[in-house]
């Protein structure tokens, strides 16, 4: 009797997420991999990177070791032009663009496939990126229908679809995708990624294998950020405070490497000027910092929240995540500001972030109001 040789699977990634990869490799080797999997975890920790590794492993045809990186399946999995392998959030203009088979010959207008291809290329260059999709980007029902409509053309090959930021499916798209999950075509696999699984339909989540990815260590954050940052990336921008802000996310480290140093200084000014009631200078600094867009304003408020949380740590004698920035506040000069004041300030910042997200009031106005009430009663 000839024994069937077990195919060996190797999924590459950071050590901190090894347990999750071992679980997946075991399912692949034992031929019990589910047809739908939901990878969740904080933004920028590598969910899309793992999804792409899985896609290669599932589509690879090497009889011994997968993914091999050379066969037709591996090439299809990594070809940004094969846009049917992805469902990606698009803004309204992009989502309403014509598909490739609808445009007239010689047209230079961008199609839905063109937009998707450009996003896929960016993901492949930096799968940790946290600011790729606009805040208004969403997954429409048309994108889901386009995905299911392409199933008839897949022939007998294995098909893997990565649904990036699956929580951005609108209601119609969620319901359409749910119907697909109820009867998944043979040899078809869905890999969903999300940082907000609670925003997804419970009925979709219940039909997927849940896989939670852990944040990386600070050393891994540095290593991965440098790896995808490329030769032109300034290694010195990854200060201890920037890595502290990242909280295990290479994507956030890369984002804050661009803005974090300036925002850390501004956060110190925000706290000090609020305590001193010196609002005029602070308002000018806020205006010069170009924080009028909701996304950037809330990313700054994340930094401010982190700083206030660090001030609480300092009160408790715990280690600091932003040592240089936190010490620059000089909180010892404001003896009335106790732990209760800092806790209330954190709540106020979180409320402001929600207000900015609602877009009922401009981000600039929200930041100014926050400065006025941040330490109200403790000045």
Image: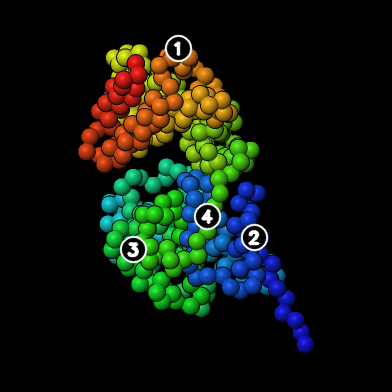
Q: Residue at x 59, y 31 (%)?
A: 235
| Distance (Cα) linking label 2 and label 4 | 13 Å
Whole-Å distance between the Cαs marked 1 and 3?
Answer: 53 Å
First in sequence: mark 1 vs mark 4 = 4
Q: Residues within 10 Å of mark 1 (few under 14, many from 20)?
A: few
Q: Mark 3 or mark 1, which is nearer the start of the sequence? A: 3
Residue highlighted by disc 3:
174
Q: CA distance from mark 1 to mark 4?
A: 43 Å
Whole-angstrom CA distance, mark 3 to mark 2, is 30 Å
Answer above or below: position of 101 versus 120: below
Work out whether mark 2 precedes mark 4 in sequence or the reverse, and give the earlier one.
Answer: 2
Assign a secondary structure to mark 4: strand
The answer to whether the residue labelled 4 contacts the one labelled 3, judged by CB atoms less than 8 Å apart, is no
Residue positioned 38% across, 21% down in the render: 270
* Residue at numbered disc 4: 212
Answer with the quarter of the image where residue 291 lies. top left
Comes first in the chain, label 1 or label 2: 2
Residue 22: which disc? 2
In the rendered image, residue 79, in percent from the top left (x then y), is placed at 51, 59
Q: Give the side of residue 352 with respect to residue 152, left or right.
A: left
Q: Is residue 249 above or below residue 86?
A: above
- Image quarter in which the N terminus is found: bottom right
Q: Which residue was labeled with disc 1?
A: 333
Is residue 260 or residue 145 the one in the foreground?
Answer: 260
Return the x and y of residue 323 as percentages of the image width and height. Answer: 55, 24
């Amino acid at each position: 009797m000839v024994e069937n040789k077990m195919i060996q699977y190797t999924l590459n990634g950071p050590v901190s997420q090894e347990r999750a990869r071992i679980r997946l490799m075991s399912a692949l080797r034992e031929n019990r991999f589910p047809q739908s999997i939901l990878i969740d975890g904080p933004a920028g920790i590598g969910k899309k990177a793992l999804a792409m590794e899985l896609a290669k492993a599932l589509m690879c045809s090497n009889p011994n070791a997968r993914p091999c990186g050379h066969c037709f399946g591996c090439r299809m999995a990594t070809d940004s032009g094969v846009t049917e392998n992805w469902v990606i959030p698009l803004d309204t203009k992009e989502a309403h663009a014509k598909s490739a088979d609808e445009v007239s010959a010689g047209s230079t207008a961008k199609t839905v496939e063109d937009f998707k291809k450009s996003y896929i290329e960016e993901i492949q260059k930096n799968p940790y990126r946290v600011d790729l999709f606009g805040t208004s980007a969403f997954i429409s029902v048309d994108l889901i229908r386009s995905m299911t409509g392409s199933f008839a053309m897949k022939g007998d090959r294995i098909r893997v679809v990565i649904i990036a930021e699956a929580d951005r499916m609108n209601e119609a798209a969620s319901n359409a995708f749910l119907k697909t999950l109820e009867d998944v075509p043979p040899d078809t696999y869905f890999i969903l990624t999300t940082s907000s699984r609670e925003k997804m339909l419970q009925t979709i989540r219940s039909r997927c294998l849940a896989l939670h990815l852990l944040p990386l260590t600070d050393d891994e954050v540095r290593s991965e950020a440098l790896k995808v940052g490329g030769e032109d990336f300034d290694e010195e921008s990854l200060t201890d405070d920037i890595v502290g802000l990242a909280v295990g996310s290479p994507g956030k480290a890369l984002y804050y490497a661009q803005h974090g140093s300036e925002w850390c200084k501004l956060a110190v000014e925000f706290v000090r000027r609020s305590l001193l009631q010196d609002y005029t200078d602070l308002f000018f600094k806020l205006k010069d910092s170009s924080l009028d867009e909701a996304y950037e304003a809330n990313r700054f408020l994340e930094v401010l929240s982190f700083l206030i949380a660090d001030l609480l740590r300092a009160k408790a004698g715990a280690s600091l995540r932003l040592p240089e920035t936190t010490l620059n506040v000089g909180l010892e000069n404001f003896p009335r500001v106790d732990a209760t004041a800092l806790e209330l300030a954190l709540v106020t910042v979180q409320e402001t972030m929600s207000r900015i997200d609602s877009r009922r009031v401009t981000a600039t106005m929200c930041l100014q109001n926050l400065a006025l009430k941040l330490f109200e009663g403790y000045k």
